[in-house]
Amino acid sequence: MKKFVKMSKRLFLWNARQSSNRNLTLFTVLAILSVVATVMLSFPLQAQNLPLPPRPQISELRGVWLTNIDSNVLFESDRLKSALQNLKQLNFNVVYPAVWNWGWTLYPSKVAQRTIGRSLDPTPGLQGRDMLKEVVSVGHQQGLTVIPWFEFGFMAPADSQLAKRRPQWLTSRRDGSKIWKEGIHDRVWLNPFRPEVQKFIQDLIVEIVRNYDIDGIQFDDHFGLPSELGYDAYTVALYKKEHRGKAPPANSKDPEWVQWRANKITDYMKRVFKAIKATKKNCIVSVAPNPQRFSYEFFLADWQKWERMGLVEDLVVQVYRDDPNVFKNELERPEVQAAQSHIPVSIGIMTGLKRKHVPMTQIAQQVQQVRNRKFAGVSFFFYESLWNMTKEPPQQRQIGFKNLFPTTTAYPNLLAGWKP
């Protein structure tokens, strides 16, 4: 290169001496500079000591759940808009806003009005607006995929309007008790085997799919039933009818009794899937369950079977574990790896709770473990604990997420050509 430059310099001086014509001299200078630039650009980047840009991923799910529990992000239009803009700036690409929670819809619902007597959650911050419409509108403006989350499934607060107005819809234990504890909260469960309950839940789902420009809809294992329940009169009679008069086993964990109820829920999931697709063919059906053993044994939600049947198009397994070895083992479960060869499988990571701080170092380590095993991406539970509900400064947390997601990338959409 030095020899080339020296030769070019001599050529320039020779031209200058040979001609007093300024135009010729200028032409010569430009020609030489052009040749020099061409040769330099032909050299490898390493020879110029320029850093190579990071190789972008083709697609990676980068999601977060937006809920109305221990969070006010959904309760004010400007706050919601700011949150979605912030997520986009940090290169997230999908949000899962809760739309069914605490026995209420979080959007104006004619179905809820008929059944519950109120079309919308009475929280003041939701009145006079359509929160879901705002998420879809602003989210899409920001390039975010919007998949509403049917958070409570068949569950409802024990003192909810729904439970009071439809007591016959509730299921129970063998001793007749109905209360199911979730932390300090008293819950009850709608009977997923009753036709009236099935119609109500399906009508809510189809209402959302039909009326909003959503990209998909998501369920979790609350779309099942705690295995200790299911001893109500309706379910017992149905079981007897299919077992020649034999009553359900007294042991709620009896394998055949568990499987019978789980299969009924699977049959319902199949009907819901068909109803969604009949309403909007390109609506993604997403499921965000706990690991298979827990989902099946405790909630009768056999998502492994749902996935094999083609009823799940986006799977986000909730692996809320602090122990690195336990976290790793869940990622390597055979049913999880099998699903990876069929559909986009992402991992749900805990970023904190109201009374539980999760450090950014742990979050980053878990994201790296997920990437090492070539999952489709990650989703975080939940928005408020990304950087607001935490012991670390918000700015420090946001820098942490920016480091995890330094560039934009596409949402891995099975219906848009995603391949394993």
Image (tube, rainbow, N blue to C red):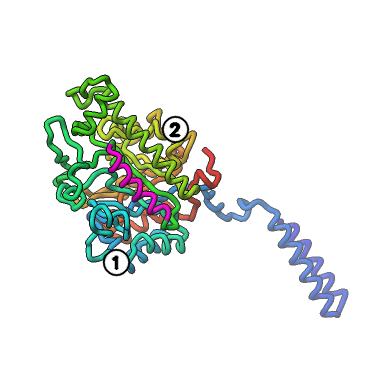
Based on the displayed image, in which of its 4 quarters is residue 187 positioned? Answer: top left
Circle 1 sits on which residue?
76
Residue 391 visible: no
Residue 400 visible: yes
Q: Residue 385 carries which label?
A: none
Give the residue drawn at x 71%, y 56%. 1
Left or right: 403, with 114 as reference point: right
Secondary structure beneath dot 2 equals loop
The image position of residue 257, as x and y in percent, is 26, 25
Label pair 2/1, CB-CB below 8 angstroms: no
Left or right: 390, with 266 as reference point: left
Measured in 3D between alpha carbons, the distance from the residue under mark 2 to the one under mark 1, in whole angstroms, is: 40 Å
The one nearer the camera, 353 or 398, is 353
Give amino acid for label 2. Met
Secondary structure beneath dot 1 equals loop
Q: Give the range drawn in magenta.
A: 194-210
Assign the magenta stretch its main secondary structure. helix
Q: Residue 309 carries which label?
A: 2
